[in-house]
Image (cartoon, rainbow, N blue to C red):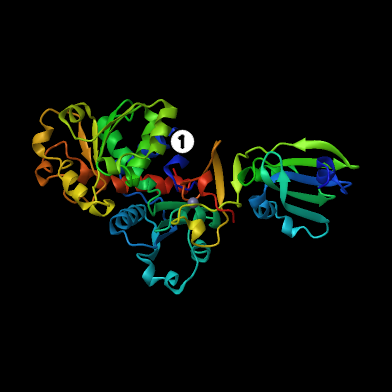
Amino acid sequence: MASKKELQVSAIENGTVIDHIPADKLFDVINVLCIDKIQNNAMTFGTNLKSNQQGKKAIVKIWDKFLEDGEVNKLALVAPEAKINIIKDYEVVEKKLVQVPDNVDGIVKCMNPKCVTNYEYVPTKFTVVNKSPIVLRCRYCEKMTDQQNFVII
Amino acid sequence: MTTRCLVSISDYSKEEIIEVLQSASEFEKNPNQRLLEGKVVASLFFEPSTRTRLSFETAINRLGGRIIGFADASSSSVQKGETLKDTIKMVDNYCDLIVMRHPVEGAARYASEVAKHPVINAGDGANQHPSQTMLDLYSIYKTQGSLENLNICMVGDLKYGRTVHSLLQAMSHFHPVFHFVAPKELRMPDEYKIYLDELGIPYYEHTELSEQVMNIADILYMTRVQKERFADLLEYEKVKNVYILKNSMLNGTKDNLRILHPLPRVGEIDVDVDDNPKAYYFEQARNGVFARQAIICKSLGIK
Ligand SMILES: [Zn+2]
């Protein structure tokens, strides 16, 4: 296997590398960041890669796209341990930390089966009432959804 | 003139609660005021609730407003599979205010986002029923002369009873002391205890409706203990008689004590209590009309 440095940043001149994603969370990350909707940027995904800290990890590289803080913070819900590197001219120019946002729109289902968001097409909206572990309060039914019960939409 | 939805009791600040209670007492003195002349109010009961509907519709009639709507969803287009959004959009075109009851939690909040006109929540499943809370507050305010520094004793089903949860939230503005009397299975949920802890509001939990608790209470708020709530019917049989209020239990209680109940009652208040001047549950229901007149006027920015 290639050296660690080469694996992480190889062949990306400008863009974002999301590293240290738990291997089983790759598709959640793709969902949450709506990466599947990006039309024109080259991307590579790797998964089941060996990681010294995590066992198996996944990695996402997006060419010519620089993730904003709001997008980065969405990762708090699915892969808070992920590391985001912003690359310019093959160099890491910024490391962004994942921070739990104050509000969560969409992304997570309300765990209350009697909630209106589970009855008809109503996008979920939550206020974050606790950050570690994450607890969300639904704007509609006012019930809590906690981290163990997160279902990503 | 600003319009104002009432979906959840937390939509009102302390000042707004007091403002609405004062307005309710004006309506009690003079209930027939044609403040809704020329206005159309939609009364949408997606599930039947005769008690709440009649109270709202009486309030609207006393204010001189006109009513459109339905008393249960079976007689409406909802039966044909129309979405809540489409029903609200349609009705919103015709009326100045929407009063709605719906079995799905969060339905009223969603409707308030979809509609241009204000929405008053007349109950959304097990979630909120803020006009009930306002009439409870009005009853407390009227009988105690103030909402401040009261000993509030809540009895019965404190786990599923939405009325006690909303009342707890609303009373939290006014420095209360709470006593929760409930069987273990129906205890006050942790989230509300955490809420009180954060606000520094004292509360005490009991499993028996003892003399000590009764004798310090200013308000005794009784609720139904429903058989369906118990996984173990033997447990139900054991606890059901523990929470029956009898007239003889009121001997040592404070003179200002008043007994409230959201009604309908099942058997938790013995009929021998009804003639005691401390029994207030029938007048409490009557207060609902005045409280709703005040809420309606506030929602339309009238007065
Ligand atoms: Zn919800």
Residue B22 falls in image quadrant = top left
In-image side of B292 versus A34 (left or right): left
Question: Left or right: B154 with respect to B129?
Answer: left
Q: Nearer the viewer, residue B211 or B97?
A: B211
Q: Which residue is mark 1?
A: B13
Residue at (23% x, 47% y) in the render? B225
Vertical position of residue B141 compared to residue B84: above or below:
above
> Picture coordinates of residue A14 (x, y %)?
87, 46
Nearest the camera: B135 or B30? B135
Q: Look at the image and tell me in which quarter the C terminus of chain A lies.
A: bottom right
Q: Nearer the viewer, residue A75 or B188?
A: A75
Residue extending farthest to the bottom is B80
Q: Is residue B1 visible?
A: no
Q: Classify residue B136 by image quadrant.
A: top left
Is residue A149 toward the left or the right of residue A4 in the image? left
Q: Amino acid at mark 1?
A: Ser
Residue at left offset 51%, top offset 55% = B110
